[in-house]
Amino acid sequence: YRSDDFTVAMETVTAWAWGPLSFLTFLAFLRHHPARYVLQLIVSLGMALSPWCPHSPARAGWTHSDPRPLYFWGYFVGLNGLWVLVPGLLLLDAWHQLATAQRGHDRPRHKAH
């Protein structure tokens, strides 16, 4: 059995960065920390992009890929699509929450007399 160096590198980032950041995001939501949506945005972006990186060469004929269409559409697109859909929805939610907060912050303040 041989491992793909790129996949090992990506999974190392997942284990050492995305895992702890995901846990930190979870704690931030439990405690209603002001940075919770920023963390959600960062983690969701990383999670939405990471499934495509090790598998994107599948169409280029790499040795660690199976060129059959069923494999590509079922495994690569179908199963990895879930790892893009869920973080994508969380990314949109974080975007909306942060934009709403910024809009509220940018409103002109009226002085009390």
Image (cartoon, grey):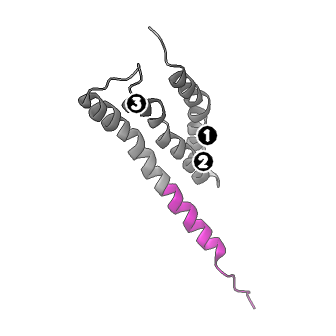
Camera-nearest residue between 46 and 98:
46
Q: Residue at x 65, y 71 (%)?
A: 105
Q: Nearer the viewer, residue 44 or 78?
A: 78
Q: From the image, give the main secondary structure of the stretch colored magenta.
A: helix
Q: Left or right: 52 with respect to 66?
A: right
Q: Earlier in the sequence, mark 3 or mark 2?
A: 2
Q: Could you classify mark 1 by the number of other residues whose Cα lies within 10 Å: few (under 14), some (14-19), or many (20 or more)? A: some
Q: Residue furthest left?
A: 70
Q: Secondary structure at mark 2?
A: helix
Q: Which residues are magenta?
A: 93-113
Query: Which residue is disc 3 drawn over?
Result: 60
Q: Amino acid at mark 3?
A: Ala
Circle nearer the N terminus (1, 3)? 1
Which residue is at 55% across, 48% downward? 40
Residue drawn at (58%, 46%) of the image: 42
Question: Taking the image as drawn, is residue 32 in sight?
Answer: no
For mark 3, does the 10 Å Cα neighbourhood hold few (<14), some (14 to 19), or many (20 or more) residues? few
Tell me, yes or no, whether the highlighted magenta stretch contains residue 20. Answer: no
Identify whether 91 is placed above or below 68: below
Q: Is residue 82 above or below residue 62?
A: below
Q: Which mark is residue 24?
A: 1
Indicate the amino acid at tag 2: Leu
Label pair 1/3, CB-CB below 8 angstroms = no
Q: Measured from the top left, where is residue 50 in percent x and y? A: 49, 36
Q: Nearer the viewer, residue 38 or 78?
A: 78
Select label 1 or label 2 by which is in front: 2
Residue of label 2: 39
Compute the Cα span from label 3 to label 2.
34 Å
Q: Are marks 1 and 2 in contact (CB under 8 Å)?
A: yes
Could you say which quadrant of the image residue 55 lies in? Answer: top left
Residue for point 55% across, 30% down: 14
The amino acid type of the residue labelled 1 equals Leu
